[in-house]
Image (cartoon, grey):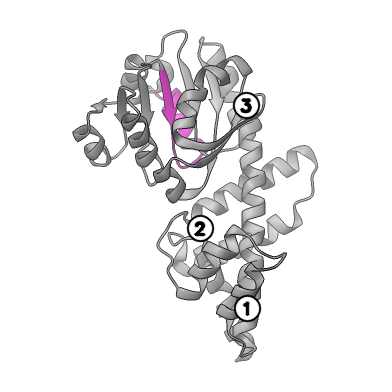
Amino acid sequence: MTTIGFVGLGVMGRPMAHNLLAAGYPLVVHSRTMERAAPLIRAGAAAAGSPAAVAKAAEVVITMLPDTPDVEQVAEGSDGLFAGASEGLVWIDMSSISSAASTELAARAAARGIAMLDAPVSGGETGAVAGTLSIMVGGDEVTFERCLPVLRVMGGSVVRVGGPGAGQLAKACNQIVVGCTLAGVAEALVLAGKAGVDAAKVREVLLGGFAQSRILDVHGERMLTGDFAPGFRASLHRKDLVNALDAGRTYGSSLMLSSLVTELLNAQIAAGDGDLDHSALVKVYEALADAHRG
């Protein structure tokens, strides 16, 4: 089977890599903090000392990193993927980064004989563990078809959206919808509570009507119970919305709601809650409601 390299073993990357290993793919792994690789190495993965070493050992390399500068450094640094890659390598970047930057990286990779797919995901840690992520892919169709069996190990839904950068643009759209819906759920539940109505009952009845959504179901419950252990950190969602706003400016598309939700996330982060789950956005509304009542 194809030897796969995996760089970035955080909350999302480690279970994704584990699923590939469990599916029988030979796996070579690297992480900035190599302690995170220990469970994979015990399960049979090989360790590499740098992204360049990963590229030398693998036919397909997957990266799952926090932000655009991290991806650029892993690709183009002195010990980066490009330094170790041979012509014909396939690079699948599953990070969530700027669509424009991803398009530029794809062009620079192609100049070195490297085929790149941008393939960001949605579904959080739960989807990463279960192998049911929604994977939105940009890149050429031939490379996509070649990599489809690998992607299907990690995703329940795998869709090629278009050419280079299209996957990242789709992820920006996803984060707009998720962020705006989170804010709407938070507003509704805080309003119910401040009016003296049982917010849990409000959520229950809304789940039976047109307002039903996965976010109201899962994150609405988190907002009621106060369980904000990070499935997806607020700081990362804010980063994704900044990328969306950049795309809006590039293409002349107004993103008024996204701008507002970005500011709400800024407030959450400023309050020291940036490492909590993005559903902790409800705490911003609770603070505002308490201030208004005072």
Tag count: 3
Is 64 magenta? The answer is yes
- Earlier in the chain: of badge 2 and badge 3, it is 3
Q: Is residue 96 left or right of residue 176?
A: left
Q: Quadrant of residue 282?
A: bottom right
Is 150 magenta? The answer is no
- Locate residue 244, reporting x and y percent: 66, 45
- Badge 1 density bin: few <14, some 14–19, many ≥20, Cα 10 Å: some
Question: For the residues carrying marks 1 and 3, which lies nearer the camera in this image?
Answer: 1
- Locate residue 59, reporting x and y percent: 40, 15
Label 3 secondary element = helix
- Badge 2 density bin: few <14, some 14–19, many ≥20, Cα 10 Å: many
Q: Which residue is mark 1?
A: 202
- Relative to 220, residue 26 above or below: above
* C-alpha gap between disc 1 and disc 3: 44 Å
**Amino acid type at mark 1:** Val
Q: Which residue is mark 2?
A: 234
Residue, far left: 42
- Locate residue 236, reporting x and y percent: 50, 51
Residue beneath the point at 69% across and 61% down? 260
* C-alpha gap between disc 2 and disc 3: 26 Å
**Amino acid type at mark 2:** Ala
- Badge 3 density bin: few <14, some 14–19, many ≥20, Cα 10 Å: many
**Amino acid type at mark 3:** Thr
- Earlier in the chain: of badge 2 and badge 1, it is 1
